[in-house]
Image (spheres, rainbow, N blue to C red):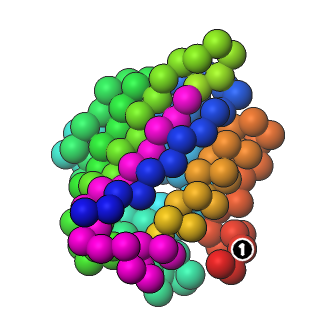
């Protein structure tokens, strides 16, 4: 099974990256403005895109402060069902390693999700380094 994976350096602390990933307020700044999230293990999240034409639902499976976040997708939003964010402090930045696991094949849906995750992870980096990200609906039409 192919996994979507990305790795990037973000010029900030692991704590700030963790907060941007684990709170609805943070997610609204880089991924989608239509976000609701209970930031606790077992908590539910719902993320709407393009006027809710696309909605992803997830459950928080794992939270390790400043180190790891794991969500399990609970609806049919994507063929992949596990989303992981791993954070590691390195010198004056944080190394974010991202994975979206569970795709059965590298098809058009996989290609689209790979591109979109890359864009939104760069939006996360931009938000944390400059104060302004490009969350949906302010993103680009890919």
Q: Is residue 9 visible?
A: yes
Q: Which residues are magenta?
A: 95-112
Residue nearest the viewer, comparing 94 with 136: 94
State the image quarter where residue 73 is shown: bottom left
Residue 22: percent from left, percent from top: 43, 41
Is residue 96 rendered magenta in the image? yes
Residue 103: percent from left, percent from top: 28, 67
Judging by the rendered image, the residue that carries numbered circle 1 is 140
Is residue 70 rendered magenta in the image? no
Query: Tag 1, which secondary structure?
Result: loop
Location of residue 72 with respect to 106 vertically, above or below: above
Write the residue at 56% across / 67% down: 116
- Dividing the image into 4 quarters, which one contains the N terminus? bottom left
Residue 3: percent from left, percent from top: 35, 57
Location of residue 90 with respect to 41 vertically, above or below: above
Residue nearest the viewer, comparing 64 with 2: 2
Q: Is residue 73 visible?
A: no
Write the residue at 65% across / 78% down: 142
Horizontal side, residue 28 vs residue 97: left or right: right
Write the residue at 58% across / 58% down: 118
């Amino acid at each position: 099974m192919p996994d979507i994976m990305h790795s990037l350096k973000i010029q900030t602390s692991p704590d700030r990256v963790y907060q941007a990933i684990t709170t609805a307020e943070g997610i609204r700044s880089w991924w989608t403005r239509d976000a609701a999230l209970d930031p606790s293990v077992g908590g539910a999240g719902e993320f709407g895109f393009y006027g809710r034409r696309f909605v992803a639902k997830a459950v928080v499976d794992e939270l390790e402060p400043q180190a790891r976040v794991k969500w399990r997708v609970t609806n049919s939003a994507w063929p992949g069902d596990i989303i992981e964010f791993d954070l590691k402090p390195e010198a004056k930045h944080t190394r974010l390693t991202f994975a979206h696991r569970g795709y059965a094949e590298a098809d058009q849906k996989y290609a689209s999700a790979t591109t979109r995750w890359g864009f939104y992870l760069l939006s996360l980096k931009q938000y944390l380094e400059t104060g302004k990200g490009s969350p949906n609906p302010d993103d680009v039409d890919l």
